[in-house]
Image: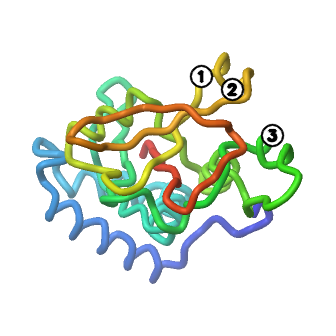
Amino acid sequence: MTNMKRELSPEQQEELIGILKVRFAKNMNLHPSLEWAKVQTKLEGNAGNLWSLNEMEKTGGEPDVVGYDEKTSEYIFCDCSAESPKGRRSVCYDREALESRKEHKPQTSAVDMAADMGIELLTEEKYRELQELGKFDTKTSSWLSTPAHIRKLGGAIFGDRRYDTVFVYHNGAESYYGVRGFRGLLRV
């Protein structure tokens, strides 16, 4: 995907901004003190971010604004689909894990796919913050950015919500399941 054009046509930009605007208005509980006009101004000033948001949208992430970073003056978009995005499931954790599989390799990894999309995997902290805004991953799970010391030992972490509680677990980084994907974050 590195040679791919990372820009949307004016029509695609307009369509995506329309989708994001409707979602923003529908989910004011995610961002009660923020104004859409300011978000839109930031979006219109960055074609690369629009492209990444479109990738999030295309893969089923339903990106929405979940906060504003005062220090960097950036809006924080996150995948807010109820379940882990459909277009990002059945992936192992990273390239090393993918290459370690002898057979039945998934097409890609969560880390590679996120990098190709221009987004970050959620950390455990960001995942827990998202879960405070709603109930996510009640039937699925999402890979999370894994601390280096865990990854060095062959593991990776993922999260979900069961029994009205957010759990963070571990698994071999090379594992993949039809109900495990990943959620991303984009700063605009």
Q: Residue furthest top?
A: 149
Q: Tag 1's secondary structure?
A: loop
Q: Residue at x 36, y 59 (%)?
A: 83
Residue that numbered label 3 is attached to: 96
Q: Secondary structure at mark 3?
A: helix
Q: Quadrant of residue 79?
A: bottom left
Left or right? Give the position of 6 relative to 62: right
Which residue position is annotated with label 2? 151
| Tags 2 and 3 touching, CB below 8 Å | no
Q: Front-most of 129 and 141?
A: 141
Residue at position x 38%, y 36% from top? 127
Residue 155 screen position, x and y as percent:
66, 30
Image location (x, y in percent) of residue 88: 55, 61
At a point 70% along the width and 49% down the height, the residue shown is 112
Residue type at tag 2: Arg
Residue where numbered disc 1 is placed: 147
Is residue 126 positioned above or below 1 on the image?
above
Q: Tell me whether circle 2 and circle 1 mark residues in contact (CB < 8 Å).
A: yes
- Return the x and y of residue 50 as percentages of the image width and height: 48, 62
Q: Which of the pair 64/124 is nearer the observer?
A: 124
Q: Quadrant of residue 48?
A: bottom right
